[in-house]
Image: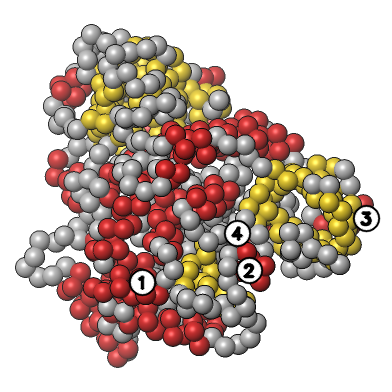
């Protein structure tokens, strides 16, 4: 029985403004002329055989047990022998890492004595403990390598100790002299690593170069090159920043770094987690990216303490390219029209919108190619995840992990296209970071907390506070110039309030495969995925989603807190079409202060209910609590019917809800 009458539902649907339609087949790997295209070389590259290196370690049994039980700050090593793809070596072994050292499956360093492996004394094996899919870091390195960036060699490793399988690790090439030689850099080249501090390697005026940048090669305390570069970054005019980049950087190193961070949604950089190298011959710089485990949907929750802030079940694909702290290199690149054009051109090439560029990378990040790559990786990694000694997951848990990465690969290109290349084009000038940039150009850094303090009425205690308020007033004046239309308003929010409408999208396709994505072209949010069970000549569907509020209509006996704070409406725009499909919806769970969970504690107890105009019916639902997606399989969609869906964890729900399956 309805809690509210639904007499006006059909009329409300008919009143929806018709939006431009788009199409995507996410499962068919042969469609060429769909929404996002790709080259056959990119697809073949995604399906290539994944190299796995076998490393067997021999060591004292007691030491082997202690190795993964050590205190995170214990840097002691143990004697060991190493067999690497049949090559016998000797040396010592120790655990290493930062936040992941507190986890049971620790990262490992093998220190070779008396010889080398591939010219290296140190063999670093990353545990990938922060990534339940074990795919994110590998994919990021592969993508940047295919883009022509200078990145370390990486390989998956099957690690056994004394014959016992420990798990899969990721070998990451040691960034030292051998790495420089392999990439054509001589002994006069300089390699720097940004310090792991919140505000340090971001080239602000306040940054202490010697404190913020460790010089790795050549060894020594001379930071003069980095100091000079920092001053140039700080003083170079935005209008001619493209000329500065052309004269200071090799290749498109900075552009590609920004593009890679934008695609993978990497915000844990621009102030740390990257290296800078200056060639001794060309005297030009390159960015060497680092640490891509918290990417592809993994999100940081700043509202909870460590370790939950890093290791959580939150998920997102809808961060704009300004993600991460302010860095004048990033800011000036987005504000300089020529550099912004290069960034956008590369993004369009990578997601499959414009072919201009290498065949190998055309559509590298398109949904079809990403889906193929992730399925390929899953076949290799599943056994290792399920059987590894530390941090093992059930088969269902691993499927949920990699299915979430796949959802990111499908949703992210749509989001980027809608926000960067559509009606309401994203602009760096409209971001909160613009306040920091304006303060920076005036010669005084204002960190976000400084700006918040300057904006507070309580900041009146001292002359210093008054000066900050005066500076902030100037910033605000430039950010919102008097007498001008306030371009810095979020146009998406403005239009949503103006029209008082929910998220809405329409999609159509003809003979292009079995799947269809419906998304909101204003926000770029994923709304529905339909995987059809039978061929069709043409389909045309519309979806609406009312988010961040309890469902307007519910069945009797359920509380709004027992439901996801979102509801969906789905219908076919072709009156004669009846079809059967797997239907997937999503909800938001970005962090503890922005989610649609309501009072739900266990998302796996949620299932979808559908109303077709007669009554509510529970549906057997596959739940992915990682990607926040709900799927009902083999759903019959009849012509002329309007389907309203809600998702609740009512008493009946555990009988209907099941883990996501592949």
- Indicate which disc, 4 or 1, sits on the residue closer to the N terminus: 4
Q: Position of residue 554 (x, y in %)?
A: 34, 24
Q: Which residue is mark 2?
A: 181
Q: Earlier in the sequence, mark 4 or mark 3?
A: 3
Q: Is any atom of residue 528 visible in this view?
A: no
- Is residue 558 or residue 93 the one in the foreground? 93
The residue carrying pointer 1 sits among few (fewer than 14), some (14 to 19) or many (20 or more) residues within 10 Å by Cα, namely many
- Crowd rating for badge 4 (residues with CA inside 10 Å; few <14, some 14–19, many 20+): some
Residue 507 against residue 75 in the figure, above or below: above
Secondary element under disc 4, as helix, strand or loop, is: loop
In front: mark 2 or mark 4? 2
- Residue 418 in the image, given as x and y percentages of width and height: 27, 44
* Residue linked to disc 3: 60
Question: How many marks can you see?
Answer: 4
In terms of sequence position, does the residue under pointer 3 or pointer 1 come before the other? 3
Residue at position x 82%, y 61% from top?
93
Q: Which residue is mark 4?
A: 152
Identified at 39% across, 84% down, the residue is 231
Residue 297 is left or right of residue 118, and the answer is left
Residue that appears at 14% across and 31% down? 17
């Amino acid at each position: 029985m309805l809690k509210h009458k639904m007499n006006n539902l059909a009329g409300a649907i008919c009143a929806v403004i018709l939006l431009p339609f788009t199409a995507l087949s996410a499962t068919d790997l042969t469609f060429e002329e769909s929404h996002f295209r790709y080259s056959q070389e990119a697809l073949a590259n995604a399906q290539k055989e994944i190299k796995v290196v076998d490393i067997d370690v021999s060591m004292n049994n007691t030491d082997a047990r202690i190795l993964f039980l050590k205190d995170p700050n214990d840097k002691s090593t143990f004697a060991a022998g190493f067999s690497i793809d049949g090559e016998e070596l000797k040396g010592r072994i120790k655990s290493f890492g930062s936040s992941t050292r507190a986890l049971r499956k620790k990262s490992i360093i093998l220190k070779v004595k008396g010889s080398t492996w591939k010219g290296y004394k140190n063999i670093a094996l990353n545990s990938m403990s922060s990534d339940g899919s074990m795919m994110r870091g590998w994919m990021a390195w592969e993508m940047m390598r295919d883009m022509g960036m200078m990145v370390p060699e990486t390989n998956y490793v099957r690690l056994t100790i004394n014959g016992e399988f420990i798990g899969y690790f990721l070998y990451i090439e040691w960034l030292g002299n051998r790495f420089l030689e392999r990439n054509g850099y001589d002994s006069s080249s300089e390699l720097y690593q940004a310090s792991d501090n919140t505000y340090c390697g971001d080239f602000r005026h306040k940054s202490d170069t010697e404190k913020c940048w460790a010089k790795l090669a050549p060894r020594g305390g001379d930071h003069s090159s980095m100091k000079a570069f920092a001053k140039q970054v700080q003083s170079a005019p935005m209008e001619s920043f493209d000329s500065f980049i052309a004269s200071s950087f090799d290749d498109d190193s900075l552009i590609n770094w920004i593009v890679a961070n934008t695609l993978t949604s990497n915000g844990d950089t621009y102030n740390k987690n990257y290296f800078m190298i200056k060639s001794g011959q060309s005297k030009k710089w390159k960015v060497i990216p680092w640490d891509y485990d918290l990417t592809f949907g993994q999100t940081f929750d700043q509202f909870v303490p460590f370790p939950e802030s890093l290791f959580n079940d939150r998920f997102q694909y809808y961060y704009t390219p300004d993600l991460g702290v302010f860095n004048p290199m990033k800011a000036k690149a987005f504000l300089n029209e020529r550099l912004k054009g290069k960034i956008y051109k590369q993004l369009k090439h990578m997601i499959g919108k414009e072919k201009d560029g290498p065949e190998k990378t055309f559509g590298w990040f398109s949904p079809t190619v990403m889906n193929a790559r992730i399925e390929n990786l899953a076949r290799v990694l599943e056994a290792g995840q399920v059987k590894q000694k530390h941090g093992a997951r059930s088969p269902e848990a691993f499927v949920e992990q990699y299915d979430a990465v796949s959802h990111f690969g499908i949703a992210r290109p749509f989001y980027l296209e809608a926000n960067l290349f559509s009606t309401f084009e994203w602009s760096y000038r409209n971001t909160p970071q613009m306040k920091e940039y304006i303060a920076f150009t005036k010669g005084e850094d204002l960190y976000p907390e400084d700006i918040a303090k300057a904006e507070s009425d309580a900041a009146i205690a001292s002359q210093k506070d008054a000066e900050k308020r005066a500076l902030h007033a100037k910033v605000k004046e430039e950010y919102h110039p008097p007498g001008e239309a306030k371009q810095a308003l979020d146009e998406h929010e403005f239009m949503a309030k103006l029209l008082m409408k929910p998220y809405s999208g329409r999609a159509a396709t003809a003979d292009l495969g079995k799947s269809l994505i419906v998304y909101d072209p204003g926000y770029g949010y994923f709304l529905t995925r339909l995987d059809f069970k039978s061929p069709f000549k043409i389909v045309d569907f519309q979806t609406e989603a009312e988010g961040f509020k309890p469902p307007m209509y519910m069945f009797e006996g359920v509380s709004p807190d027992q439901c996801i704070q979102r509801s969906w409406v789905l219908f076919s725009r072709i009156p004669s079409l009846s079809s059967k499909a797997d239907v997937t919806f999503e909800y938001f769970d970005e962090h503890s202060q922005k989610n649609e969970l309501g009072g739900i504690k266990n998302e796996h107890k949620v299932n979808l209910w559908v109303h077709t105009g007669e009554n509510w019916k529970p549906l057997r639902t596959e739940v992915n609590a990682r990607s926040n997606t709900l799927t009902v399989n083999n759903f019959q969609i009849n012509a002329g019917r309007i389907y309203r869906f809600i998702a609740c964890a009512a008493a009946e729900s555990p009988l209907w809800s099941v883990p996501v399956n592949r």
